[in-house]
Image (cartoon, rainbow, N blue to C red):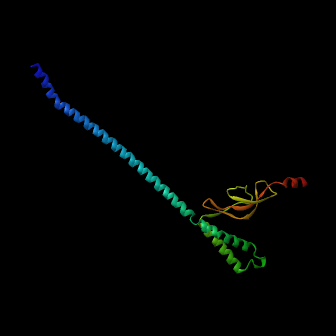
Amino acid sequence: MSSEAEEKPNIDTAPELAESEDMESLRQELAEEQAKAEANLAGWQRAQADFTNFKRRSEQEREEFIRFVNAGLLLELLPVLDDLERALEHVPAKLSGAAWVDGVKLIYRKFSAVLEAQGLTQIEALGEPFDPNLHEAVRQEKGREGIIIEEIRKGYQLHDKVVRPTMVVVGNEEDLDMDKEDE
């Protein structure tokens, strides 16, 4: 009988053992599926963040493109603006009150206003310290060292980006000390 008693508990424990193995395999499958779900969620979140960054970067690039798309055209128009300025500076005194001269002045102001509305601003130079990012030195003459003493051609910026540097004459203080001694 002892052998039957030993066999009987084995028969009774067999379904429990099979049930326990099934539960363990189900737990393992559940853990694997949870790991897959977490990996998929993390991948989706990375893709979402990448897409958001791409959208923001594309929008910034588009805005910058729009801001500077007309830079080439504005550069072509600057010599016309220069010519108008020179013409108005050299109007003889006897013609300064003529109606057509006033008309040209109005055209110049309107043209300048249109360019300014597009974001074009003049770079101030005279009396300012020389800045190679804004100015192009064409020569040096006696004057305060490093200070712009003459403006040869106006420079312009488009939305804080230099489109044409100002051509300037910079002081070199070379003969300035001699002039002070002579006084």
Q: Residue furthest right?
A: 182
- Left/right placement of residue 12 relative to residue 92 reads left
Residue 131 vertical position relative to residue 118 in the rendered view, above or below: above
Residue shown at the point (49%, 58%) measured from the top left: 59
Instruction: Residue 99: give x, y in percent of width and height.
Output: 70, 80
Residue 1 vertical position relative to residue 153 in the rendered view, above or below: above
- Give 78 or 123, whichever is nearer the viewer: 78
- Give 132 or 158, whichever is nearer the viewer: 132
Q: Residue furthest top?
A: 2
Instruction: Residue 101: give x, y in percent of width and height.
Output: 71, 78
Residue shown at the point (33%, 44%) measured from the top left: 37
Q: Residue furthest front?
A: 3
- Give 155 or 8, whichever is nearer the viewer: 8
- Give 91 or 30, whichever is nearer the viewer: 30
Residue shown at the point (41%, 51%) measured from the top left: 48
Q: In this orientation, does residue 38 appear? A: yes
- Left/right placement of residue 108 relative to residue 48 reads right
Q: Residue furthest left?
A: 1
Q: In this orientation, does residue 112 appear? A: no
Instruction: Residue 178: give x, y in percent of width and height.
Output: 88, 54
Residue 75 vertical position relative to residue 28 in the rendered view, above or below: below
- Left/right placement of residue 174 relative to residue 7 reads right
What is the quadrant of the C terminus in the image?
Answer: bottom right
In the rendered image, which quarter is residue 103 located in?
Answer: bottom right
- Left/right placement of residue 12 relative to residue 142 reads left
Instruction: Residue 80: give x, y in percent of width and height.
Output: 67, 72
